[in-house]
Image (tube, rainbow, N blue to C red):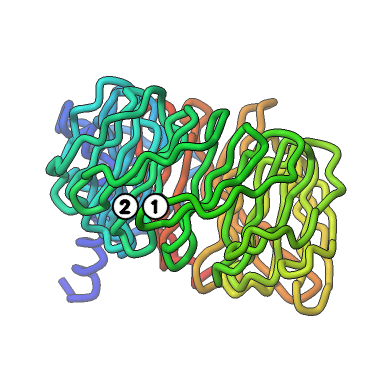
Amino acid sequence: MKAGIAHEIIYDGCRFIALNMEVMKVAAGHVLSALAFTPQGTRLYQTYGEQYEGHLGVVSAFEQKWNPTISVMVGHEGSVYFVEFSGDGRRLASASGDKTVRLWDGQTGAEIAVLQGHSEPVYLVVFSPDGTRLASASGDKTVRLWDGQTGAEIAVLQGHSEGVNSVVFSPDGTRLASVFGNKTVRLWDGQTGAEIAVLQGHSEQVNLVAFSPDGTRLASASDDKTVRLWNGQTGAEIAVLQGHSEGVSSVVFSPDGTRLASASCDKTVRLWDSQTGAEIAVLQGHSEEVYLVVFSPDGTRLALASDTTVQLWNGHTGAEIASFPGFSFNFTLDSSKFLSINNEEVYYINCITGDKVTVPFGMFIDSAVAVSVPGLDLWIIHARRKQPLLQGLLVVKILNNSDLSIMSLCWFPSSLSVNHFSVFSPSQVAIGCYDGQVLLLDVDFSSLL
C-alpha cells in the first residue's frame, strides 16, 4: 500500500473512531453498520466499504467528505451551559447542570478530568489568560479555582450570599472578580484564591464586572442605576458614575482603557472617561432596553443591541454611524467590517468605506449568534428556527465590499439543541448542548475564502 493511501486511511480511521466511539463501547459489532455511514468519498469507505455491503446501506443523502465534527464528547448528565477554550486552544472546559466541570483535550476531544465539588449547577467557566487556572461559578454561591492543565482543585472561594452573575480574571491573571446576584463584588487572588477585598457601595444587585485592559481599574454595573470604578489591585473605590435613570446591565472598557461604556434599561448607553469618571456622551435612539454594548477591537466604533435594533456609533465622540434591524452582531478582528443579524437578513457595513449590504437568509431565523473567525473575513453563525425545527452553523463570507455569501457549514438533528458555542483560531469550534453532549469541530476556514 502506498504511503499516501495509508496516510489517508489512518486519518479516516481516526475520524471514524472519534465519531463512533460510544457505539463501539456498547457493541463492537455495530462498527460494521457505522461503516455504512462513513462518507463515500473517503479512502476508508472506498477500501473497505464494499466488503460489508450486505449489512446496512445508505441509499440517499450520503456524504462524500467528513463533516467538521471530529469528536462527540459525552459524560455530562445535565445540560451544558458554557464551553470555553484555553488561550492556546489545548484545553476545553464545559460547565453543566450536573454540578460538574469537565476538562477536555481541545484538539482531540479526549477527556482529561471531571471537576467535582459544586453542589448546584455550574453556569460559567473561564480560563486565566495563561491557561494555568480555571474558575467555575455555580448556583451553590461559590467559585472554585482549578488547575487548568490537570483539573486539580486549588481553592474554594466562598462568601457570596446568592448565585453567580459574573466571574472574570484580570488581564494578567493575578486577580479574579466575582458577582453573585447581590450588592457586592469580591476581589480574589487569581493564583491562590485568597480573598483580597469585598467591594461595597452599590445599593442594588450588581449585574456585571469588567477589568480595564491594564488591570488597574475594575468597573461594576448595578441595578442601582450607577457604575462604580474600583482599584483593580486593592478594591478601593475610585468613582461613582451617575446619570442613568434605570438599572445598568452591561459595562465595557475601550481596548486602550481610556473610555468606558455602560448600557442601561433606560434605553441609552453612556460613554465615560475611565480615568476621571466624567461623562463624554449619551447615546440615545433605542426604543427598548439596551442589553449589550461592545467596542470594536481598535476602539474606534461602539455597537449596541436591544431586542430588535443594532446601532453603530463613533467610539470616541458618541456620534451615531448606522442603525440596523437585528439582535446579534460582531466585528471582524481588524475592526474594518461589521455584521448585524435579524430574523430574516444579514446586514454588513464596511467601517472604512461606509458600503452597506443586505443579504437574506432564505429562511426565518428565531435566534442567531455571530462570532468572527480570527484572522479571516468570516463570521460563523449558529442559527435556529422553530417551525420546522432546524439548526446549524452557517458561514458568512465577504466576497467584496458590496456582496456577501452565506454558506452552510453543518446541520444538526432537531433533537440536538445547541446552548453555547466557542470559536478558537485557527480551526476549532466547540458546541455545548442541552442534552449534555459537547461537540468538537475542526473547520478548515481558509478553504472557504
* Residue shown at 20% from the left, 61% from the top: 10
Q: Identify the image quadrant of residue 81.
A: top left
Does the rendering let one see residue 37?
Answer: no
Q: Residue 127, percent across and down?
A: 31, 52
Instruction: Specify whether 115 is left or right of 274.
Output: left
Quarter assignment of residue 427: bottom left
Give the left or right position of residue 232, taking residue 145 as reference: right
Quadrant the C terminus occupies:
bottom right
Q: In the rendered structure, are the residues bearing label 2 and label 1 in contact, judged by CB atoms less than 8 Å apart?
A: no
The amino acid marked with disc number 2 is: Phe
User: Tag 1: Cα neighbours inside 10 Å, few (<14), some, or many (≥20)?
Assistant: many
Query: Which mark is in front, 2 or 1?
Result: 2
How many residues crowd mark 2 within 10 Å: few (<14), some (14–19), many (20+)?
many
Label 2 SS: strand
Of residues 290 and 334, the one drawn nearer to the viewer in this rendering: 290
> Closer to the N terminus: mark 2 or mark 1?
2
Number of disc labels: 2
Reading the image, the residue beneath label 1 is 441
Structural distance between the alpha carbons of marks 2 and 1: 20 Å
Please determine whether, in this image, residue 115 is positioned above or below residue 239. Answer: above
| Residue corresponding to mark 2 | 127
Q: Nearer the viewer, residue 118 or 253?
A: 253
- Describe residue 227's horizontal placement relative to residue 266 as left or right: left
Under circle 1, the secondary element is: strand
406 to the left or right of 45: right
Residue lying at 60% horizontally and 52% vertically, measured from the top left = 370
Comparing 49 with 396, the one in front is 396
> As displayed, is residue 5 above or below residue 396?
below
Residue at image coords 57%, 52%: 239
